[in-house]
Image (tube, rainbow, N blue to C red):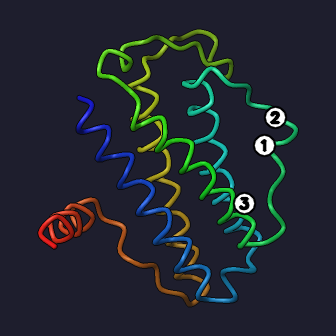
Amino acid sequence: MLPLIDQLIRHKWWANFNLLRSIERFDPAAEDAELRKLLHHILISNRYWLLLTLDQPFIDEQERLIPESHSELIDQFTATERIEMDWLLSVAPEDLDRRLQPRALPEITVSVAQTAIQVVLHSQGHRSQCATRLRALGGNPAPMDFVLWVRDQEVQSKV
């Protein structure tokens, strides 16, 4: 399962940054508070589950502050990606079975693998909302499909 989770997480970051760049290139979108709020939600949801996996604190008061600019949001995405990619490089297959107790859902426990899938699926849904908002503002989202990411990976491996 680790190779699939690795691919899904790498695709998630590729798709996130394609979306962020599309928004950055279109000023009305880069300045749109609704888009920034949605993107921030993607980010803090990712951070919540990642920090839970890493057994690090998620400090609500800090995490819930929506950045004032699109560039600040991009910086926060970049920092979080670095943390997650460092984890991904060190995770062993048996680590995926470790059980976690999310404080947001105290009635359940989930595996590390399940949290990774949660983040991937959750961000996918909200990226769709962002793409819809970007189009409504007159912008054009870059491709974010998994199969396009797979194609790009195959092309890069041949270079």
Q: How many marks?
A: 3
Mark 3 nearby-residue class (10 Å; few <14, some 14–19, many ≥20): some
Q: Residue at x 61, y 19 (%)?
A: 102
User: Label 1's element?
Assistant: helix
Q: Which residue is labeled 2 in the image? A: 60
Q: Quadrant of residue 74?
A: bottom right
Percent x, y for residue 138? 56, 90
Percent x, y for residue 136? 57, 82
Residue type at numbered disc 3 = Lys
Q: Is residue 138 above or below residue 98?
A: below
User: Label 2's element?
Assistant: helix
Q: Which residue is labeled 1 in the image? A: 63
Which callout, 3 or 1, points to the residue nearer the camera? 1
Mark 1 nearby-residue class (10 Å; few <14, some 14–19, many ≥20): some
Percent x, y for residue 146? 27, 59
Asked if the residue under mark 1 is in contact with the one under mark 3, i.e. CB atoms within 8 Å, the reply is: no
Asked if the residue under mark 3 is in contact with the one under mark 2, i.e. CB atoms within 8 Å, the reply is: no
Residue type at numbered disc 1 = Glu
- The dot on residue 37 is 3
Asked if the residue under mark 2 is in contact with the one under mark 1, i.e. CB atoms within 8 Å, the reply is: yes
Q: CA distance from mark 1 to mark 2?
A: 5 Å
User: Label 3's element?
Assistant: helix
Residue type at numbered disc 2 = Asp
Q: Quadrant of residue 40?
A: bottom right
- The dot on residue 96 is none
Mark 2 nearby-residue class (10 Å; few <14, some 14–19, many ≥20): few
The quarter of the image holding the C terminus is: bottom left
Of label 2 and label 3, which has the lower sequence position? Answer: 3
